[in-house]
Amino acid sequence: MLKKTLKWIGIVLGSLLGILLLVGGALYYQGSNNIDQIFEVADSRLVLNIPSDSAAVAEGKRLAVSRGCTECHGTDLSGQLLIDSPAMATLAAANLTPGKGGIGKEYQDKDWIRAIRHGLNRQGRALAIMPSVEYSHINDSQLGAMIAYIKQLSPVDNELPERRFGPIFHLLNNFNDEFLPGRVVVHDRERSVDISPGITVAYGEYLSTMCQGCHGPTMAGGIVAGAPGSPPSANITPDPNHGIGNWDEADFFRALRNYERPDGSEISKGMPEFVGKMSDEELKAIWLYLQSIAPVAQAVEQ
Ligand code: HEC
Ligand code: HEC
């Protein structure tokens, strides 16, 4: 009797293990498939007026810093290794210069547009981690200035390893499209007319698309994104108890530039530095916008 029971337990456990292996294998396969999928973007969407005057180049440089490019690609945009773990991935933010190991020599305007706005490499495969869901909202004149700046970078030799994905990446990638933002970008989204910069709610709303990946579409926070080990994002709606409803504009500036809350406590670097590098005008516009949105009375679960 006991022997028979043991035998059945053996069969049940054996089948469970078999099923697990099958499911795991299927997920792994699907994950790999995702990575190799090719996305086509219509040629008409890959044209843009790229200026070359020095004012545009200077503005492009300011944008590259204040939109986060230099945080991942390095101060001189010559790239750097971001993840180096056989189980997870080997992944470098590309060298954007025309130096050795860089893509600057070969890339044409349409390739820059495809990479930044659509999150796709030249073959049409989704770039990993590169935050193009946010960048797909950058308007034509600002994207044009950014590309103008990148196109005139001095060559920097920096050869980086090819991207490689490990088993953990493959599994996580099945549950979270955010690893390959190019899969999530709406490639044929209607482009709105260029919005003029200024201290207006409208310009603040346009800029706030840079916050949504981490703070969520309603800005209520609670999302774990960004650097490993960083806390969930904060509620930045005007709710007085759970959001920033009791802050004034100076508090907002101090939070973004000095990492300090009104009560003196420290904000972690889970909140990226590039936001504090936006111009005064841009931060004032975001502040105006954040005050205009609906408060969400919801605490962030730590
Ligand atoms: C959070 C980190 C991060 C930020 C911020 C970021 N990138 Fe990237 N970027 C990457 C990574 C990682 C890759 C390589 C992805 C891959 O090979 O799958 C990449 C790839 C690229 C490529 C394409 C390279 C190729 O092989 O086709 C370009 C162009 C690029 N980034 C430009 C930019 C610009 C311009 C900005 C700012 C507007 C920016 N990136 C911001 C991480 C980042
Ligand atoms: C890469 C993810 C990321 C992006 C992008 C991001 N944030 Fe954050 N932010 C965070 C995280 C994480 C925290 C919480 C840090 C902590 O609790 O120490 C935070 C905290 C904050 C805080 C402090 C709030 C408080 O009560 O402590 C403010 C203000 C803020 N973010 C504003 C913004 C704005 C405005 C933008 C867009 C222009 C933005 N953030 C973009 C991740 C992000």
Image: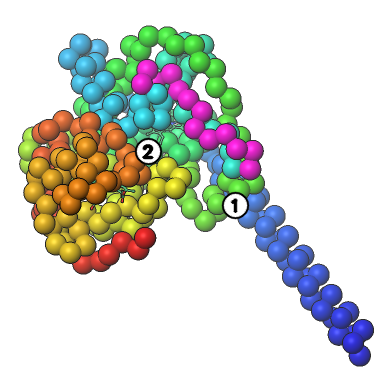
**Depth-wise, is mark 1 or mark 2 nearer the camera?**
1
Relative horizontal placement of residue 285, taking residue 111 as reference (left or right): left
Q: Which residue is mark 1?
A: 171
User: Where is residue 250, by image quadrant?
Assistant: top left
In front of the other: 160 or 104: 160
Numbered badge on residue 153: none
Q: Which residue is mark 2?
A: 132
User: Where is residue 18, by image quadrant?
Assistant: bottom right
Name which residue lies at 39% across and 20% down.
Answer: 77
Residue 152 within the magenta-colored segment of the rendering: no
Q: Position of residue 179 (x, y in %)?
A: 48, 45
Q: Position of residue 246 (x, y in %)?
A: 11, 57
User: Where is residue 182, by image quadrant?
Assistant: top left
Tell me how far mark 1 sits from mark 2, CA to CA.
22 Å
User: Residue type at mark 2?
Assistant: Ser
Residue 77 within the magenta-colored segment of the rendering: yes
Name which residue lies at 72% across and 60% down.
Answer: 22
- The magenta-colored residue range is 75-87
In front of the other: 237 or 50: 237
Pointer 1 local density, CA inside 10 Å: few below 14, some 14–19, many at least 20:
many
Q: Quadrant of the N terminus?
A: bottom right
User: Residue type at mark 1?
Assistant: Leu
Q: Position of residue 267 (x, y in %)?
A: 28, 46
In front of the other: 135 or 114: 135
